[in-house]
Image (tube, rainbow, N blue to C red):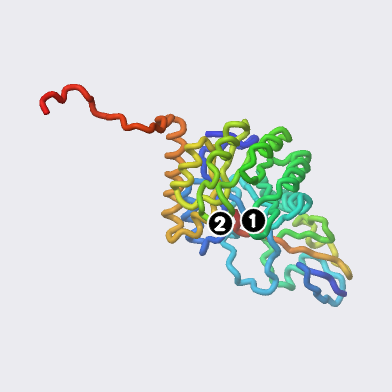
Amino acid sequence: MKCKINGDVFNFEQPINIQEVIQSLGLDETRIIVEHNETLIKREQFTSRIVNDEDNLELLEFVGGG
Amino acid sequence: MFKIGNFTLNSRLLLGTGKFENEKVQTQAIEASETEVLTFAVRRMNLYDKDLPNPLAKVDLSKFITFPNTAGAKTAKEAVRIAEIANHAGVCDMIKVEVIGDDETLLPDPLETYEACKVLLEKGYTVCPYISNDVVLAKRLEELGVHAIMPLASPIGTGRGINNPLNLRYIIERVNVPVIVDAGIGSPKDACHAMELGADGILLNTAISSATDPVKMAEAMNKGISAGRLSYEAGRIPVKYTAQASSPTEGIGFL
């Protein structure tokens, strides 16, 4: 299945949960903010929320800014 | 001491966290500034280069009043979305509404800024809009219910200091909510000047983070802001055209 993550297309063998997406990309989970199909996802939902074909994920964080 | 919404601030220096070279310098500069309020931005994570430094990730934001900005937004809708993201993450004590209307000058879009403030106030945020030196817009935003007004000194990152002291003073005198001068400060002289005009505080970033020695500059800015505030409270002497001797003019017959 194909989904968009931060604007780029990613391929996964089957629908997976958000936690698995983060792990497969090797990202620091502690500072990540996840928006799944324009809905903000709580950390405790990372394992239950499934990413399906054609879904859109935004993986965001805070950075320095003024 | 002054208040923005429900937040009481002892320090009048609000600090942006962009462009610090590394975590160590950033930490020391934050300490030297004695700020209680930190500003930061929301961005996409880099999925490909995980080694890119993010000094902000090391800062314990729970020790500060969190003041994310909506930088990057060009519409009210985008600004609201950024605020919602920061709020969802639990680090949005106050929101700096920054909606840029011109890519070259990075000057704010007054109409989109107003609309974003309206929506965010309805949602219960503590709202502080970044605006040009426009006293009418400042008054309209105050009527809307914003918690502070943040007029620029000069365009973001230019370090040009206070370009329009007259309009800045009009804003300070005409609105009753706190006025935080934001953007364009270059040196402690500029920060002191803004405080002497009666600003309640200064939001700084580049002037500290891009100084040759950001830690020393943070201390200098802190002192400049304190000095400016003291001067404002003390009441400076009027500017005169003719000289007036400070030593007695009598008793000089022996000369």
Amino acid at circle 2: Gly
Identify the residue shown where x is 42% and y is 39%.
Answer: B227
Q: How crowded is mark 2: few (under 14 residues within 10 Å), some or many (20 or more)?
A: some
The percent coordinates of residue B118 (x first, y second) are 76, 41
Q: Name the residue under label 1.
A: B106
Subunit ID for the residue under disc 1:
B
Q: Which residue lies furthest to the top in this view?
A: B250
Disc 1, SS: loop
The percent coordinates of residue B10 (x first, y second) are 52, 37
B221 over B177 or under it: above or below: below
Subunit ID for the residue under disc 2:
B
In the rendered structure, are the residues bearing label 2 and label 1 in contact, judged by CB atoms less than 8 Å apart?
yes
Whether residue B254 sits left or right of residue B2 in the image: it is: left
Q: Mark 2 points at which residue?
A: B157
Identify the residue shown where x is 53% and y is 61%.
Answer: B20
Whether residue B38 sits left or right of residue B113 in the image: it is: left
Query: Could you say which is closer to the camera, residue B14 or residue A17?
Result: B14
Disc 2, SS: loop
Q: How crowded is mark 1: few (under 14 residues within 10 Å), some or many (20 or more)?
A: some
Measure the alpha-carbon separation of dots 2 and 1: 9 Å
Q: Residue furthest left?
A: B254
Whether residue B109 sits left or right of residue B27 in the image: it is: right
Query: Could you say which is closer to the camera, residue B185 or residue B47?
Result: B185
